[in-house]
Amino acid sequence: MTDPATNASFAEIAGALEGAQSILVASHLRPDGDALGSTTAFALWLRSQGRDVTAWNENGMPEKFGFLPENGLVGLPEAGRKFDALVALDTSVKNRLGTVLKAIEAPAIFINIDHHVSNERYGTLNYVDPASPATGQIVFEFLRDRGAEITPEIAGNLFAAISTDTGSFQYTNTTARTFEVAAELVKAGVNVGELSCAIYDTQPRRRFELLKLAVNSARFLCGGQVACFSLKRADVERLGLTPEDSEGVIDHLRAVDSVVAAVFFEEMEDGKTRVSARSKDLRVDICKVCQLFGGGGHPLAAGARMAGPIEVAEEKFLKAVCDEVGKCD
Ligand code: AMP
Ligand code: MN
Ligand code: MN
């Protein structure tokens, strides 16, 4: 094992994978475009190298991401399978891989490639770059370094990964390099209009109903600097919502001019509360607030899972956010 505090080189990672016959590629539960796009792209590359590759996600491939090229590659975890190596992508803490972990107890080769500043460097080889806006961008750099062919399928997955994690190339994490990478992906065959329409303009009607609910019940605190919205179990059931439907709803709260921090609370089936939080001001490190409650993420986008009931979780979290926002006044 190399020093977990030091990033392994891409050559070391590729070398370690050469020594593994069966390889599992996985990413965090409740996956987003970056998790699934990176997983599929990496799995496609391994397959092109003649490797025995399996791609799993705790939630499989959600219907919403059915447009990703070769999306059938990502399946649900199966019990009892064993692998020589595990590649975790876009996953800051090991347990966010979910039951995938059961497939490999203490894997000899455990590669952790991620861009979360809060990454716990749990791999035997870690490559964590918080300056990268998406794990998909790191995967691109890895493939380029290895001289891999960026096929149209790999390009589509990486473009979707980067586009979704940068808020369609709008967030502060977007750099000149991100546009260079995006240009390379377009040259490799991405149809920007078609892919963006599939990502952003093809929402199920129930998501619009959720948005109506959010707009109607949003609350503003701390002189309008903090906005929040809570989703109760009863509404999830009434509207027939799936986990990915709520993704991005928080952006509408964040978009209000007075808002510095936006928080979305969701009552989960297990009674816990899922917290999704965003900041618009680098002085308000929302990851730090989430870490107070066992969560993590990025300075401007982070999350946590808190003990219920939801009203108690809301009160504790909002107090911590208002304290953090108050420090900037
Ligand atoms: P979300 O609000 O679910 O879109 O997540 C925003 C960011 O926070 C993502 O980068 C997640 O990986 C991270 N995140 C969300 N929930 C958690 C959690 N319970 N623990 C650690 N990181 C989280
Ligand atoms: Mn992610
Ligand atoms: Mn990501």
Image (tube, rainbow, N blue to C red):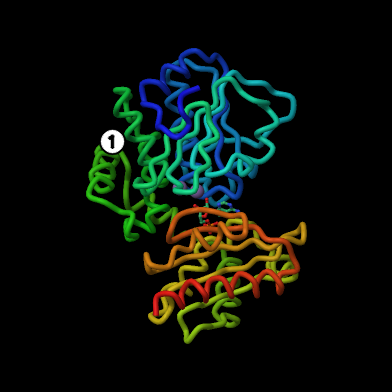
For this view, does 118 lie left or right of residue 187? right
Above or below, 13 relative to 135: above
Residue 53 drawn at (x, y percent) = 54, 23
Query: Image quadrant of residue 299?
Result: bottom left
Relative to 280, residue 193 above or below: above
User: Does the closest atom of ligand 3 sit within 8 Å of the Cβ of label 1?
Assistant: no
Percent of width and height locating residue 9: 36, 26
Is residue 73 shown to the viewer in this render? no
Quick one: 4 or 257, which is closer to the camera?
4
**Is residue 130 found left or right of 270 in the rendered image?**
left
Q: Using the image as rendered, state which of residue 10 and residue 245 is in the foreground.
A: 10
Which amino acid is tagged 1?
Answer: Ala
Instruction: Name the residue: 38% across, 41% down.
Output: 129
Is disc 1 surrounded by few (<14), some (14 to 19) or many (20+) residues within 10 Å?
some
Query: Residue at point 68% right, 61% down?
Result: 306
Measuring 74% from the left and 29% from the top, which residue is drawn there? Answer: 79
Could you say whether the residue bearing mark 1 is in a helix, strand or loop? loop
Image quadrant holding the C terminus, namely bottom left
Viewer-proximal residue among 77 and 102: 102
Horizontal and vertical percent position of residue 102: 70, 31
**Residue 299 against residue 36 in the figure, above or below:** below
User: Does residue 74 appear anywhere in the picture?
Assistant: yes
Where's residue 65, x and y in %?
52, 48
How many numbered marks, from 0 up? Answer: 1
Q: Check disc 1 and report the residue beneath it.
A: 188
